[in-house]
Structure formats: C-alpha cells, structure tokens
Amino acid sequence: MVSETWMSTLICKIKKIVRPSIFFFLGISAAFSLWAQESRDIDKWMDMDLDQLSKVKLVSVSVGKKNVTIREAPGIISLITSEEIRNSGARDLIDVLRLVPGFDFNVDVEGAIGIGVRGNWAYEGKAMLLLDGQEMNERQYAIIPFGAHFPIDQIDRVEIIRGPGSSVYGEFAELAVINIITKNNPGSEGITLSSTYGSMSDTEARKNINVMIGKKIKDFNMNLGVYAGDAKRSRLDYTDIYGDSYSMKDNSKIEAMSLNLNLQYKNLSTRFIMDKYRYMMRDGYDQVYELPMKYTFNSYSLETKYETHVGKAFKLVPRINVSSFYPWNSTDENSQLLDHFYKVRVDRLKLSLQFSGDVTDNIFLSGGVMQNFDRGSILGDTPEDSYFDGEKRVHFSNRAAFFQAFVKTPVIIITTGLRYDHHNRYGDSMVPWVGLNKVYKKFYFKFLFGQTFRAPNIANITLSDSIKPEKSTEFDMEIGYELSGSMIFSVNLFSTKIKDPIVFMVDPETQEESYTNFGKTGTWGIEAEWLCKGEWGYINTNYSFYRAKKNGLDLVKVEGNPNLNLGSPAHKITLNSSFNITKKFSVNPSLVYYSKRFGYMSVDENEELVLESFKPATLVNLFILYKNVIKNLDAGFGVYDVTRENFRFLQPYKGYHAPLPATTREILLNIRYHIQ
Amino acid sequence: MRKKIAILFIISLLLPVIVQGLDVIPEDMQAVLVLKIISFTKNFEKLLKSEVTIGIFNNDEILQHFYTASKKVSFKIQLISLPDTSISIEKINILYIPKGTSQTNIEALNKQAKKFKVLTVCGDPDVILDRNLSLSFYVLNESPKILVNMKSSKEEGISFSGKVLGLADVRNIEK
C-alpha cells in the first residue's frame, strides 16, 4: 500500500512535468516555424542538371505532411492506385485490401465482416480507416463494417500503413491505417459515370451506380461523388454450430449509399461525407435467428479547414470536424420481434491545429494539438437501453498533442514521433516511436521501433468501468532492393506485442457483453513483396507469414497449435497483375492464396466447440478491361473466384459463431464513361 | 494447387520489364523541368539572351512554382497568368496547361498555340497524345520522365535537343 502511494505520487509528478513540457515543446516548434524560410525543394532541383533530375525519387506517400518516396518513408507502407484497382476489377474494399501483405478478413458476429492484420484480429478499434482525411470507424465499437461498403470507383489511391500509426493518428491506429484518397478532390474535372453489375450462378450478386462531378471556376473547386448500390454477401447456406441453417441468398442483402462533397475556395475547404450502410443477416451470435434483421451504420461527417502558410515553408491547418454516427442500429420490425431493437447515436466535435514544414533542407517537422468532445446517446426507450448507471447519454473528451521530426543526415534518415493523449475517463496515454532509414545505391533499409495504443471506445468504457487503453510494442525491419529500374524486391520482419488487450466477451447463455484488459497477445512474421512494371503491364506479388507469440490469449489461439491464431492462415500469397494486349485492351489476373486455417463450426454432445481445419483456399480472379470501346467509354468484364472455392469467413476467436460464406463465383460487368 | 502457385510465382519473377506509367508528377517539379528543358531547346537559344514568356492557364499555384523556379535561372522570364481562352497567346513562347483543364479549353488554347507556334506543356500526361500537345511528364519508377509528342512539337515548330530526346519517352515519331 505504501509503495503504491509512493508510486502514484511519482507518476503524478512525472505527468505534471511531462504534460506541460509536450505542449511547451509544440509551442516552441510552432514559433520556430516563423523563422523558417521558403520551401527549398525547387531550389534544390534547380541546382541539378536534367540527368540528375530524371533520377530524383519522387513522392508516393506522406509522412506527417511531407511527401517522400516509399523507400524513405518511415513505415511499412503499401500503396494501391486507382489504375490497379480498376484493372483488377475489384468489387469492393475487401478485394482491394486482400492484396495487401498480412491483411485478411474474418467474421465477428451478426454478419459483420472485419479486418485482420498480420494474424491479429484488428476489427474492433485496432485499425483506422480514413476517407479523404475523415475518420470512418464508428465511435460506439470503433469498427469498420466491410463488404460492398465504400465506393471503390471513386478511389484515387489507398495508402496503407502496415503497422502502428498511433503517434500521428491516435485512437484506433494501433495495428494499421488505411488512408483512402478519392478523386473527389481539386484537380479532378469533368463528369464520370460508372456502374457495376455482378451475378452469381443463380442470383444477382451486386449492382451499383457511381457519379463523380468536378468543376473548377477560377479559385473555386467543387467535387462531388455519389454512390448507390446493393449486394449479397453470399448465395450459400449458413449453418450455425448447432446445425441449424438458412439460405443467405435472400437473407444477406447489403445496401450502401454515399455522398462525398468537397467545396474549396482558395485555401478554405469544406467536405461533407454521408455514408449509409445497411445489411441484412440471420446468423446472430451463435444460433441462427428465426427472422432476418437489418443493421444500419449511417454516418454524417463535416470538415472545414483552412490552410495558411507561415513564411513559405510552414503550413498551418486549423480544422473543425463535426460528425454523427448511428452504428449498429437495428430498428426494423423483425429486430423488435427478436428483442434486438437498438438505436444509438454518437456525435463528435473535434478541433485541431496542425503544422508541418521544412526547417532546413534536411529537417522536416510536423505536429498538432487537438481536442475531441464525444457524446453518446441511446435513442431506444426500453429500460435496458442505457449506458452505465442507466444513463441515456454519456459525454467524453480527449485532448492530444503529437509531434514528428524527419531528419535527413548524411548517413541515415531519422524519424521520431511522440503522441500524448488525455482522456477524461481513462486518463493518459503516451506513445513514442523512432524510425531509421537508409538508402544506399539500389538498397534501402528501414528499422522502426515504438509503442502504439488502442483507445477504448464508448462501448468498452460504458460496459467496463475500469477499462484502460491497450498498448502494443511494435518492431519492424525492412530491406529492399531495386533489382532493375522497374523491379523492386523487399522483405520485412515484424513483431507486434499487445499488452492488456481489450477483450470482448459474450455470455452465450445471457448474450450479455463485457470487456476486460486481459493477458497479452501478438504475432511476429515476415512479409515479402516483389513489384515489377513494364510496357507489357505489371506484376505485384507478395507473401506473408506470421506466428502467434507465446503465452498469447487462449481465446484467439488454435488449440494444439500455439503458433497459430484462429481464422488467420500462417501463409498468404497474392498476385495482382495486368497485361496490356493492345494499348486499349488488357487482361488482369489476380490471385489470393490462403494456407490452412482453423476455426469452429460445430459443437459436440457436451456443447463444447469442435476445432476444424479448413483446407487451403485459392481465390483466382480474372478481369478484362477494354478502354475507349467508344470515345470515353471503358468496359470491363471479369470472373471472381474462378475455381469456385466457396470461401468462408472464419471467426478469429472462440466466440461460438460458425464460418460465414462469402460470395461464390461471380461474373462481373463494369462500364465507365467520362466527359471532360 | 501449391505447385501451380509456385510455378506462377517463379514465371512472374522471370518476366522481362520495360517501364511505363502515367502518374502525374508534382507541379513544382514540372515547373523546374520546363525551365531546364528550355535551355536545351534550339528554338529558345535567342530568347534566352532576351526574355522567355511563359503563359500559365488559370492556375495561380503553378504560376507561383514557376516564379520560385525562375529566380534560379540565368535568363529573364516573364510569367503571364491566362484566366481564360479569349486572351491571345501570340506573344507567349511556352503555354502551360494544368491537369484538369476542360477539353474545350484545351482545344481553344491548342488552336492558338499551333497558329502562333507556342510550345504546349500539359500537366496531364494522359491527354497530350489525344489532344495533340507537345510536352508532359509522368512518374516512372518513382522518378520523373519527360514525355514528348513529336507530331505536335513539329506543328509548333519546336526542335528539342538530343539531350532532351535522349532522356524522354518520345511518341508519334514521324518518319
């Protein structure tokens, strides 16, 4: 007791010193920016001759707000362009992200598909998705429901950080950040119409329509993207662990609609994103429901920001974000009959000020301060519908500061970052990290080490009063080699150790949900990528492998095989390729191979779960694209799951949910018309 | 199936490679490249001793990049902002057309450029062949690549040096 008091006092004193120090440090940095001179990139390039200029490595991703090459970026990064997405015929974000090393998809409960990263289940608050800079994780459980959700025809590129992003993005960027940049941004002009129709053997698989409009009038830019579509999760039967089943053909409809409007006048811009998503399901938690019911995940986000320059090198961006999320809302008639009525709304007001810029040719700083105000409202009127203490409303706030420095020394590039968060409920979190990069002739080398955290979401806090953020220690090392001017090979080694993970539990008897910080988990592994591009097209292929850490959670481990986590294959190989047959006509095969997976699909006579081994699966896809069939009209035709693997999403923890069937072989037609 | 995947993987590793990509390079880099290329273009030899006039169509940000870059060259540069296509480009030597310019505007500008022998540079490499413009740039292996449309440059009376053509991806070569 004495030592605890002594310790608490010491921690308090450290916090008192550290907290103002961070803000002071940020203040000094911002002030320092006033002394900074104009950007030196142009000056530097003007000192080069044409030969040297043609060898300058250009930007592909942003670090803080600095654009650097992937080789120099202090992170393990994947970049998927609109060209690759379009050529592959990807139907939704699942098809796109499956091509990323270490990324995978699994089922949670009640028809919800989530993401796994490097063998870790990242569904609930462990991976962050940004759409044109706006956070799309819903706020109640911090999940991103996947499956025919986001309009991929509107995507310009997807930047993916495979690893921690907490020091910049905070909250849910523990294991990965998926940053989607759409074409609904200044620079895109004209009107684009596109539509996709997909069919499985005996039923329609999907249909959608997409419109993008971009117009620039002097200093004013307007960009609008509108999308509406529906799809079916599968045409197969779902069978629960007790042997009851139902046909998903008529019980798994997904409906999505979105609007993304950006208005920009000079340096002032406003973006509004409406994302409406609804799906039907009957699979429930463990036993199939008697009736199909619908879940909706609607959100409305508004962002206004102003970019201003201090000198010419430093940029300051004050920003206001207002958003309302309606996650997991089930209000239809069947939900009431099944006693699953749920109506909730979570609002957020976020104020932030970020800065970024070059201090010298070789030092780039970025950072910011932000304050969030969250309000959760239970809109249902039954007595059970309430947060803790029977409250219908809860209020939380979080303030944060982050700082990142990118220093290019003659020997090595050093990137270091620090983020501090203070939440009114669960207190302080601080995550430092450091990255070292070296580019030497055709080789590059990256070493990253740091901490990352996952903030508890509203459900975590309200269901479990004593919940704390979970913390991860992350280690990455990557070596890349440019085999020729157009071929790059890279291999990286990673290790993720999650301490006190926030674990979700459902009592199968009472359906009561709870959360707790419990034990530790994590993985280590290897990922290798080979990229090659030519006049003939391109080939991107990668291999990923993981092993579960020793002493991990039994809840996620495969019984009798402690090296593996449930639902996640140890080996994954992907191929994404495009072959130009003529200037207009290309053939685009893609492939995803999963090694053996483990999961539960039944119970024995004692109602104990029976572990099953699922044979390796290979999803082979082929898409043929014909550009300018007639002027400005492109048409594509493809087949997904050519070999009819009948893939199933497995539950990546011991949660009594059987594997959920995915789409089977699907024939796909896509047309796109663009008017300048 | 495993064997098939392994074979596919090995075959793909052995495929030959010649690069082509049409990702747009940053505009500040484009400004630098244009000014560098001028020095290697025979048509501008005389102008370099007096003044080169560059017109930028309807984009102040790119104009600013040209302005910053122009401070580092040894010859005089006059930069003109062209807010719309009604303005004559007769006295301009180089016309920069930003990415996103409408087809109608490109056509109107190009008509004048061909008439007054003005070098057309376009921020969007995807359109220079279709719209018959002369010069653009794209990203190749994370580095800038010059793209030259010989047909258009010939119509504009522009003769790039061997140095530029040696580094460039040259299209529409007329024999």
Image (cartoon, coloured by chain):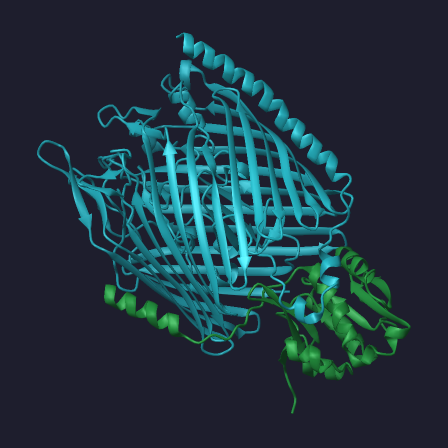
Chain colours: A cyan, B green
Instruction: Note whether residue A307 is visible.
Output: no
Q: Residue placed farthest to the front in the image?
A: A411
Viewer-side residue, A518 vs A138: A518
Viewer-side residue, A579 vs A310: A310
Q: Is residue A310 left or right of residue A304?
A: right
Q: Which quarter of the rendered picture does the N terminus of chain A lie within? A: top left
Q: Is residue A629 left or right of residue B79?
A: left
Q: Residue placed farthest to the right in the image?
A: B50
The number of numbered discs placed on residues in the rendered structure image is 0
Image spot of residue A464 (x, y percent): 38, 20
Q: Compared with residue A402, is residue B5 higher up or lower down, i.e. above or below? A: below
Instruction: Note whether residue A656 is visible.
Output: yes
Q: Which quarter of the rendered picture does the C terminus of chain A lie within? A: bottom right
- Say which residue appears at 8% left-offset and 34% top-offset: A605
- Asked which quadrant contains residue A191, the reply is bottom right
- Say which residue appears at 51% left-offset and 15% top-offset: A10
Image spot of residue A554 (x, y percent): 24, 33
- Asked which quadrant contains residue A390, the reply is top left
Q: Residue placed farthest to the left in the image?
A: A605
Viewer-side residue, A546 vs A622: A546
Image spot of residue A411 (x, y percent): 59, 52
- Say which residue appears at 24% left-offset and 67% top-offset: B3
- Asked which quadrant contains residue A60, the reply is bottom right
Q: Residue placed farthest to the bottom in the image?
A: B175
Q: Is residue A659 left or right of residue B85?
A: left
Image spot of residue B9 (x, y percent): 34, 67
Viewer-side residue, A511 vs A420: A420
